[in-house]
Amino acid sequence: MEQQMWDIVIVGGGPAGMAAGIYASRSKLSAVILEKAKPGGQAATTEEMENYPGFGRGATGPGIMEAMRKHAEDFGTTIIKDEVVDVELDGAVKKVITKSGATYQGKAVILCPGARPRSLNVKGEKDFIGKGVSWCATCDADFFEELDVVVVGNGDAAIEEAMYLTKFAESVSVIVIHDEGILDCNKASAEKAFANPKMKWIWNSVLEEIKGDGIVEKVAIKNLKTGEIWDLETNGVFFFVGTVPQTAFLKDKVELDGQGYIVTNNKMETNVPGVYAAGDAIQKYLRQVVTAAADGAIAAVAAEKYLAEEEAFNAQVLEQELPVAVAFWAPQNENSIQMVSALEQAMTGFEKAKLVKIDVYRNQLTSSRYEVKDIPAVLVFNKGEVKARFEGSFTADEVVQKIDGGLA
């Protein structure tokens, strides 16, 4: 079934989606968040979250995300439980299709599908989530003060996180699948890790099982060369074997990198006009609740500017009955300022067309869409289409003469 037209459709109700909803609704835009599970995403399953600014010790993931949900709804954001399975992002009206068969139409879309930690499906892994099993050293390291932990993984992120854990833990045992001395991380990180007295190395091995009575107490480790399986007492297990972005439904819809993460610029813009992305599913350095929320805020503000620019251009140019001369200029470009002034004089009393001035720095989307690369430039529109183009060396009189002579 067809739903109402929304200003912004937000895919995903984690920290990025909630922040986007708050900022969009506060800007008086109609916004809907589509979330397949409980609002809050992975953050809502993290019991302790003491590193979110302003909340401090005792803060919980469910508590923080519930506060975000209430905040978003209080400003007018609509939150609907439904799973997004497809999107149609070309054109001015975007469509988001859900598993229930509903289609949500939006003038802009913010993609916040998130990413999940890569699971090894080791026996006991799911049983001890929040009870000693973690995927985030930054979030949980201080809970293991002067305790022993195990790290699974040996890439850049794994070794970096393991080094961070040594600031808190008594010992950090790293299970490595390779022969002794071989790590997948960069050489500099490896040298620092080998020099750290708190780091211990278990070579040619894999994690077989996590054991305990209510909390993690030991792990079973298998030596790949001998086949021997032995137990190591520990208080925690940290997995750092990568994350999996939840972007399969976006293939061939927006630009993704080789790992499936959404490619954006610093405004959270994708390669599709009017489509933004935020949170753990985008290319980024740090995947935390605080950075996801920041991404969502940026995306919503950028989307609001996009919608305002689109609305103004449609009303002033594309929907006009008379031809419109659109002069592209910039306050730092003296030639463009002089051209605009000359056009204003030449078109004074000229009733066959209107003049609209576009500052290229404030209206980058419009400038890019019409491939305005050099200024001054003038594009003459009639009935929503470009009928004449002036760039480089031209005069205001030439523009007026072209319009006066008729536009085919």
Image (cartoon, helix red, strand yellow):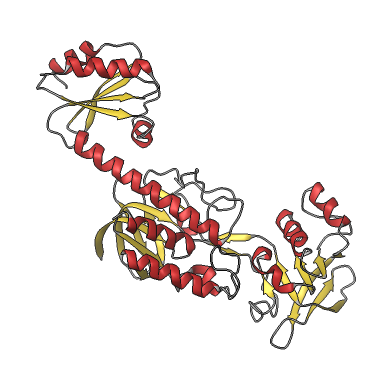
Q: Is residue 354 above or below residue 320?
A: above
Location of residue 119 by image quarter: bottom right
Residue 73 screen position, x and y as percent = 35, 68
Can you see residue 352? yes
Can you see residue 78? no
Q: How many circles with numbers are drawn on the protein?
A: 0
Residue 349 screen position, x and y as percent = 10, 19
In the picture as drawn, the residue positioned furthest to the bottom comes out as 213
**Left or right of residue 101: residue 64:** right
Location of residue 181 by image quarter: bottom right
Q: Is residue 380 above or below residue 284?
A: above
**Left or right of residue 239: residue 60:** left
Residue 402 screen position, x and y as percent = 19, 15
Position of the N terminus, as image quadrant, is bottom left
Residue 302 screen position, x and y as percent = 40, 46
The residue lying toward the viewer, choosing from 109 and 182, is 109
The residue lying toward the viewer, choosing from 358 and 103, is 358
Residue at position x 70%, y 68% in the image: 141
**Left or right of residue 217: residue 120:** left
Position of the C terminus, as image quadrant, is top left
Residue at position x 59%, y 52% in the image: 259
Location of residue 76 by image quarter: bottom left
